């Protein structure tokens, strides 16, 4: 399917491609006048951008709704042939000729084009160099695709198209119905819920099992309201209702991540179908939450739709190979398929990029960025822009007006984002800028574009082994040392710490006190001394642990459960902003994200996955185990959104929880 280039003007602006007449005054001669004009221009534009910039809530759904209604009718009318029709549509989504042109394929093609017109989409590769056109076998048993979204309109057109392309490429589309798509959205003020409703309808048409939760009850405002009731006036330290700080932010993020994992262990039961009715719905056991939480009243809070209910095994969970977490990023299907090929890894991640903030740049880089912004954003002649960027007063005015805003991001360059979570093979942070790792062996591999072992990663796109999220196991002992593992007791959704089996501890509910229940569960888990059961769930830190991200703590729990094979794949590069995607793809003169500073792009070779598999025991696992003795902890600051990376980091010995044996089955 063709991809529009889109946004080409942005880079030409950023490079200052303007033609100006020679009669323009010299900056040296008229410097004071130019400075005054610049100050007025910057102050006015900053005021207007902050005063009048709002989220767009317009969602042009008329044509899309018409296409979906027609497709739903065609699927119903197809009867026994509906599965073949769905397979053709899945292959069309993956960019493969479905082999037959009928009304359904023509309407579906129009639908895809309409989604593409909603916003930015990447010109992704139509083939993989290793396995040929769009025919990945990475989810032969099944993959669980999970995403937590909030105000994600910018990335959703691309995310929807590329997710459909991934599903259509799995076993030539034949494995898509063995997968499950789970999305949890809450608190959005833009058109994210409406676009997710559209995704749900598309997945239903294609026969892909899914649960799409929109306007979920676990949201920032509800969370802070509960905290206010618990803490009295002390809640003010957490800031406004749009922000969560300190450990409460991690509690909240753990809760929404666990919410999106709920269908893994608690698949909603299937509603009986009428004769000939293929549009059967999963009915959620949590469906009492139907009034629409989080200030978005009037809409159903939970959407549970599927056309396939025969995949639930006798142990009460979906039989999945992998869990693929997708953040609100721009990605391509080849990125997901590349990570899925590393089936020997317990965790495989790409690298996520964001525009460089001013504090990451030296003075000459800041001046160049200011000149690009003035020339590209305001049309200032290039030689004026360069002179102004070197002038102390105009630079201070520009920095004050834009230094903490996103206005200059289209003219910045990509830097690595998730340094709070990612730890290299030595346990140290991956840095924002090249060489990224201070450990020479890791730095060299990343620079060459080689897959590299790590202690922890997440990075916007993560492929995890599903087993530790599914297996009912207990931990044994390593030598004479007892290995204590707590089953995500502080994690919130899906925890069952009191042994009654209801799985509701820590859940938002009209009849429970969320914060009290959660912290009682933490206390209970902390006092436990014996082995604890899997499955894993996200959580916040316990007393004595690093006040780390919920994803970092998941890495610690995976290592404690014996899952040590964490892989960082530097050729999978995702972006949170469209301007970064433009930069990574070289303004779309290439179909691979090659423009990442300090990283060589290396297409995947036929033997790469096998080489990774044999490297774990030969060399990599001993390196990771040695690095576990000094894992860098950068704890989140109380009441703030981030850690203090300059003064708040220190190594911690995590080797005591390193598990080298196999978990034993529960009795």
Image (tube, helix red, strand yellow):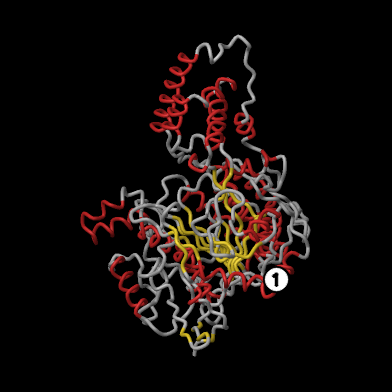
Q: Position of residue 176 (x, y in %)?
A: 64, 64
Q: Nearer the viewer, residue 342 or 422?
A: 422
Q: Nearer the viewer, residue 602 or 198?
A: 602
As displayed, is residue 115 above or below residue 303?
A: above
Q: Position of residue 101 (x, y in %)?
A: 75, 51
Q: Residue furthest top?
A: 23
As displayed, is residue 452 above or below residue 602?
A: below
Q: In the rendered picture of this protein, how many numbered marks are placed on residues?
A: 1
Residue 136 sits in quarter: bottom right
Residue drawn at the location 45% of the way across and 53% of the way down: 645
| Residue that mark 1 sits on | 615
Q: Nearer the viewer, residue 347 or 230?
A: 347
Residue drawn at the location 73% of the way across and 51% of the way down: 126
Q: Is residue 298 left or right of residue 630?
A: left
Disc 1 on helix, strand or loop? helix
Q: Is residue 278 visible?
A: no
Q: Is residue 644 left or right of residue 140?
A: left
Q: Is residue 578 left or right of residue 603?
A: left
Q: Position of residue 406 (x, y in %)?
A: 48, 38
């Amino acid at each position: 399917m063709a991809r529009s280039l889109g946004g080409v003007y942005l880079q030409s602006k950023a490079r200052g491609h303007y033609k100006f007449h020679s009669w323009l005054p010299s900056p040296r001669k008229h410097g004071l006048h130019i400075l005054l004009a610049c100050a007025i221009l910057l102050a006015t534009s900053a005021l207007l951008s902050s005063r009048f910039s709002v989220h767009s809530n317009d969602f042009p759904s008329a044509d899309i709704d018409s296409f979906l209604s027609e497709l739903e009718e065609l699927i119903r009318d197809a009867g026994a042939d509906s599965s073949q029709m769905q397979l053709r549509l899945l292959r069309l989504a993956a960019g493969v000729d479905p082999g037959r042109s009928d009304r359904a394929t023509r309407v579906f093609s129009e639908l895809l084009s309409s989604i593409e017109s909603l916003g930015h989409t990447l010109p992704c590769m139509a083939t993989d160099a290793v396995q040929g056109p769009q025919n990945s076998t990475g989810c032969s048993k099944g993959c669980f695709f999970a995403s937590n979204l909030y105000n994600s309109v910018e990335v959703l057109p691309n995310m929807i198209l590329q997710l459909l392309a991934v599903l259509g490429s799995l076993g030539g589309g034949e494995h898509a119905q063995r997968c499950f798509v789970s999305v949890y959205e809450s608190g959005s003020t833009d058109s994210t819920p409406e676009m997710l409703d559209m995704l749900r309808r598309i997945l239903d048409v294609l026969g892909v099992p899914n649960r799409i939760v929109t306007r979920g009850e676990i949201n920032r405002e509800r969370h802070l309201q509960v905290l206010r009731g618990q803490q009295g006036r002390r809640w003010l330290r957490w800031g406004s209702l749009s922000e969560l700080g300190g450990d409460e932010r991690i509690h909240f993020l753990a809760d929404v991540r666990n919410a999106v994992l709920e269908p893994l262990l608690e698949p909603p039961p299937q509603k009986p179908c009428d004769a000939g009715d293929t549009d059967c719905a999963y009915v959620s056991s949590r469906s009492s939450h139907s009034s629409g939480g989080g200030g978005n009243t009037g809409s159903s809070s939970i959407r549970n739709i599927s056309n396939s209910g025969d995949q639930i095994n006798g142990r009460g969970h979906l039989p999945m190979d992998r869990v693929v977490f997708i953040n609100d990023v721009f990605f391509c299907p080849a990125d997901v398929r590349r990570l899925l090929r590393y089936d020997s890894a317990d965790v495989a991640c790409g690298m996520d990029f964001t525009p460089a903030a001013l504090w990451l740049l030296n003075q000459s880089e800041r001046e160049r960025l200011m000149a690009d912004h003035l020339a590209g954003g305001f049309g200032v002649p290039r030689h004026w822009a360069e002179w102004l960027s070197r002038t102390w007063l105009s630079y201070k005015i520009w920095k004050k007006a834009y230094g903490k805003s996103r206005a200059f991001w289209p003219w910045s360059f990509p830097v690595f984002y998730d340094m709070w979570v990612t730890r290299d093979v030595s346990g140290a942070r991956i840095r924002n800028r090249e060489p990224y790792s201070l450990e020479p062996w890791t730095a060299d591999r990343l620079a060459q574009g080689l897959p590299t072992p790590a202690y922890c990663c997440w990075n916007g796109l993560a492929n995890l082994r599903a087993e530790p999220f599914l297996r009912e196991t207990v931990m044994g002992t390593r030598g004479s040392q007892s290995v204590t593992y707590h089953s995500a007791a502080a994690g919130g959704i899906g925890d069952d710490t009191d042994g009654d089996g209801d799985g509701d501890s820590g859940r938002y509910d009209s009849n429970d006190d969320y914060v009290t229940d959660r912290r009682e569960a933490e206390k209970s888990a902390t006092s436990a001394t014996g082995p604890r059961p899997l499955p894993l769930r996200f959580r916040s830190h316990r007393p004595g642990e690093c006040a780390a991200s919920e994803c970092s703590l998941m890495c610690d729990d995976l290592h404690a459960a014996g899952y040590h094979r964490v892989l960082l794949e530097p050729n999978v590069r995702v972006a949170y902003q469209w301007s970064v995607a433009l930069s990574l793809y070289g303004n779309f003169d290439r179909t691979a994200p090659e423009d990442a500073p300090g990283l060589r792009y290396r297409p995947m070779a036929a033997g790469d996955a096998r080489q990774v598999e044999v490297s774990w025991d030969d060399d990599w696992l001993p390196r990771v185990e040695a690095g576990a003795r000094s894992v860098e902890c950068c704890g989140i600051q109380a009441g703030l959104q981030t850690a203090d990376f300059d003064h708040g980091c220190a190594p911690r010995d995590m080797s005591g929880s390193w598990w080298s044996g196999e978990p034993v089955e529960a009795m």
